[in-house]
Image (tube, helix red, strand yellow):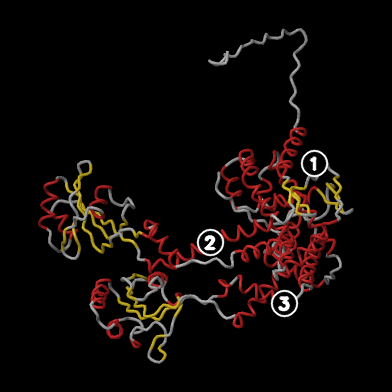
Amino acid sequence: MNKKVAVPVLSGVFVLVVGVLLLLNFLPSLRGGAAQGTPALKVNGTTVTREQLEAIKTRNPVLGSATSGPLGDDFKTLIIDQQIRDTLIGAASADQKIERSVVNAQVTETRSKNNLTENKAWTDALRGAGFSDSSYREYLRTQLAIQAKAKAIQASAPKPTEAQLQLYYQLNAQTFRSDPRIVAREIVVATKARADQLLTQLRGGADFAKLAAANSLENKERGGAIGPLENGAPRPVAQVALPTEVGAAAFVRTTGGLTEVVSSGGKFYIVKVENFLPAAPKPFAEVRAAVSDAVGTELKNQALENWVDGLKKNVKVESVSPDWKYNNPVVATVGTQDIPYAEVVTGVVSNQQFSALLQQQTAEQVAPLVNSFLKPGIVQQLTQQYAAPAIVKAQNLPLVGNRAGLLAGLNAYGARDAKVSDADVQAFYAGNQKNFQTTAKATVSEAVFANKQQALVFRQEFKSGDFTALASKAGATVSERGSVTAGDKKLNDALDRAVFAANRLQAAGEGSLSDVTDTSGRYSLAYVSDLVKASVRPLSEVRTSIYDQLLAQKKQAAATAYVAAQMKTVKTQDLLAQVLAAQTKRLAAEAPKATTPTAPAGSATPATPTTTPATPAGNK
């Protein structure tokens, strides 16, 4: 398990705000929403019930997948932390005035969308979710207030500065690029045979526009031009202007030229690329509005995070129920900031690899893997996120966003000068030829004869005609294998080699015949048509993908090095090992003690046999 684990860490307030928007119109997902029931803890004096905590577990199946052991303890910490956050945000949003008419309209919409217009159906659904009509309306009012408060906080965020806009544009240039385009013509015909004939003529020097005008089913009136004509030349088009398979074939022709015959939608295409226009950055003036929107969103995220951080700063949590004790120790420090353990658990639960592990193994089996491999990476990422604002300030960079956004900005800043040369591309291509090999394919019919002599005679005598009919007449059993790719197991291994690897195909009619193969007394030969031999794709076809791959690698390396260097200027402490050790000790102390049965009075105590372990040789 040395593989690097992706560790996305989500900010709770953003999940909450999105959740409000989703849940307003969907009642059945809610359980125990009303703050009524058995008290479990108090948050700044506000009672939180067991039912509210259990509701969080119900809404997230992962949190209900373990109730004991390290993962069960982790989930309990996260459940309580989420409820504390929700309680704080709800209380802080109480100043938002939500008119009764707004709540009533939302209730009407919820009932309609959930097919609960009948009063009995409505009250039954509410009861099943732990609500009365009045308590649900109060719950809904609270959620609408939170939504309004979040919008108010976002609206108070400062407006982007010119420096922030310019730096965001520079660091995210790939987001503001035009699509690659081609100047091209096409010929579209109904049969492959006709397409092959035309491709042969084109390769012999025939005029593409004239052949298109005489033969194409599409755009023949403009000589096959894919885009409208401007001053006699086709207008450049993006890949979406072509069928998927055709676009893929045309857009790898970065140096121009003809495609092979491409089948799509029952038609056959040939495209001539006259000019390839690569993707290019759009001018800042053209994308200024989009850049401003993106930076504005980052500033709003920052404002929300700062707001929630302020709410949590002096929170007082009092455990009422011994079953819901709150254990949320500091797992790392960054300067004077403490990172709570619940944020690590949030990262674990939101990790897709963790969810997949839980489906394959028990919680007891997963826990050691999570502690050893997933949590350390999450702590490292959280540490970098908490350090990001201080680094940005020290470097005097006009980056904005919440902690996660600032770290992403620092990574982009560190990678800004990464470059890939043409020599890099050529070296990678030369050293990785296997990555660019195409697989041989063909259309195959297989004839199986009872004896070898029959098969050999038929192979010698067949020159043209209906292979299936003539082979059957000669005593063979014929199977249409259809489109076959080398190694796809549609043919037995011997026949697959005879078709694709032996280089001994014998021309016959419009196709060719393979050698006769013997497989456990079955004598087979294949009739092969539309053969496409295995080959290495030319550099011109794969240059762009190689460039993108190498650039991503270089940017990742540069970003990692830059952030690592900046982290050396920040005082940090990783306390994960101590937190996990304390959890193990606490869970052991809380575990029920095993009891030894007492022997009945007067009963004999059986003798305990004593076994002396053997001493290994050499240890005497």
Above or below 393: residue 4? above
The image quarter containing residue 282 is bottom right
Answer whether residue 182 is visible to the viewer in this image.
yes
State the residue position of label 2: 554
Residue found 76% across the figure and 27% down from its top: 593
Q: Earlier in the sequence, mark 1 or mark 3?
A: 3
Q: Earlier in the sequence, mark 1 or mark 2?
A: 1
Please state which amino acid type lies under the numbered disc 3: Thr
Per the image, label 2 sits on a secondary structure element best described as helix
Residue found 34% across the figure and 83% down from its top: 224
Please state which amino acid type lies under the numbered disc 1: Asp
Please state which amino acid type lies under the numbered disc 2: Lys
State the residue position of label 3: 161
> Residue 130 placed where, x, y %?
77, 54
State the residue position of label 1: 323
Above or below 233: residue 80? above
| Horizontal arrangement in the rendering, residue 315 relative to residue 160 (left or right) | right
> Residue 198 placed where, x, y %?
25, 77
Assign the N terminus to one quadrant of the image: top right
